[in-house]
Amino acid sequence: MLGKILEEADVKKKVDSLVRYLAAYKVIEGNYELFDKLARCRDVEDFIRTIYEGVRVKDRVLDKLYDGVESGEYKVAVEGKVTRELIDKLFSVTKSDLEEVFKLAKANPRLVGSIIASFALSYEGVYEVRK
């Protein structure tokens, strides 16, 4: 399971998309409870419900992130101008991404949830600017 997440390029790319989105969610929403729930999933249904909780506010999170980057409240660790298109490219998660992650979670939702939560919490590519 861990090898698949870390080593298979197509799977890693889809997991990384969710990780980046959840990292943005963490910065914008500040809801650390979601990450605790993700790491404690008892079954795949818990896992899917927890992911739903985070993804259902995706448009709001991406809008706030873009507005916050524009106002200097948030930073995204990239060179050059951060456009709305770049925010969407870096931090959006797709149906295809979620389908792959849900397939992984079927085998061991607690492990997959813990890995994704750990990666998202430690992601340094988006952060709040301290004033």
Image: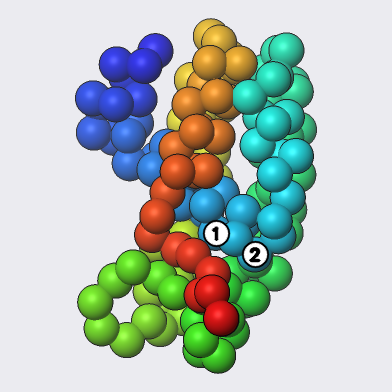
Residue at 64% x, 64% y is 28
Quadrant that contains the N terminus? top left
Kindly identify the residue that appears in the image at 25 percent across and 83 percent down. Answer: 80
Q: Is residue 42 visible to the viewer in this orientation of the structure? A: yes
Q: Which residue is mark 2?
A: 28
Question: For mark 1, does the 10 Å Cα neighbourhood hold few (<14), some (14 to 19), or many (20 or more) residues?
Answer: many
Quadrant where the C terminus is found in the figure: bottom right
Of 107 and 128, nearer the camera is: 128
- Tag on residue 24? 1
Is residue 17 something one can see in this rendering?
Answer: no
Image-based side of 82 in relation to 130, left or right: left
* Label ID, residue 84: none
Q: Residue at x 33, y 68 (%)?
A: 77
Q: Residue furthest top?
A: 107
At x 40%, y 83%, the residue is: 83
Question: In the image, 111: left or right of 81?
Answer: right
Using the image, determine if residue 88 lies above or below residue 109: below
Please identify the residue farthest to the front as the structure is shown: 131
Please report contact status of discs 2 and 1: CB closer than 8 Å, yes or no. Answer: yes
Of all residues shown, which one is farthest toward the bottom? 71
In the picture, measured across the screen, residue 36 lies left or right of residue 101, that is right
Q: Secondary structure at mark 2?
A: helix
